[in-house]
């Protein structure tokens, strides 16, 4: 099982993103990019993800699924 981001549900706000802080594999990263409509984006590196599911519980927008 790997975490995947449903980007259309994600507000991509670094200060709100507990999964990016709490992911034990450091697989979730905020990227600031002013060229994007939301000013940045969240990415999940599936190769680093260990499938623990912590991010699904913490996600502010119900935007992460394990599949
Ligand atoms: S399932 Fe666990 S390891 Fe994978 S991205 Fe979420 S918190 Fe990180
Ligand atoms: S907690 Fe979830 S919805 Fe909120 S910014 Fe992070 S990945 Fe996106």
Image (tube, helix red, strand yellow):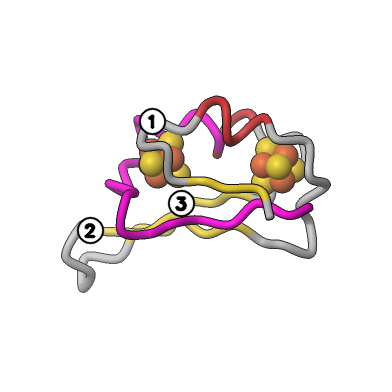
Residue under label 1, please give it.
60
Residue at disc 3, CB closer than 8 Å to ligand 2: yes
Q: Nearer the viewer, residue 41 or 59?
A: 59
Q: Nearer the viewer, residue 49 or 13?
A: 49
Distance between the alpha carbons at the discs numbered 2 and 3: 10 Å
Ligand 2 closer than 8 Å to label 1 CB: yes
Q: Which residue is mark 3?
A: 30
Residue most toward the right?
A: 50
Residue 24: quadrant of the picture: top right
Q: Residues within 10 Å of mark 1 (few under 14, many from 20)?
A: some
Give the image location of residue 11, x and y in percent. 27, 46
- Label 2 beta carbon within 8 A of ligand 2: no
**Is disc 3 in contact with disc 1, using a CB cutoff of under 8 Å?**
no
Does residue 18 belong to the magenta stretch? yes
Q: Residue at x 54, y 51 (%)?
A: 29
Q: Which residues are magenta?
A: 1-19
Along the line of sight, the residue nearer the viewer: 50 or 39: 50
Q: Position of residue 60 (x, y in %)?
A: 38, 30
First reached walking from the N terminus: tag 3 or tag 1:
3
Q: Is residue 59 left or right of residue 61?
A: right
Label number found at residue 39: 2
Question: For the C terminus, which image quadrant?
Answer: bottom right
Image quadrant of ligand 2?
top left
């Amino acid at each position: 099982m790997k975490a995947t981001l449903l980007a259309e549900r994600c507000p991509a706000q670094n200060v709100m993103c507990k999964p990016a802080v709490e992911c034990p594999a450091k697989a979730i990263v905020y990227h600031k990019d002013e060229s994007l409509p939301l000013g940045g984006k969240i990415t999940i590196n599936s190769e680093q993800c260990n499938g623990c599911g912590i991010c699904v519980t913490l996600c502010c927008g119900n935007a992460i699924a394990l599949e």
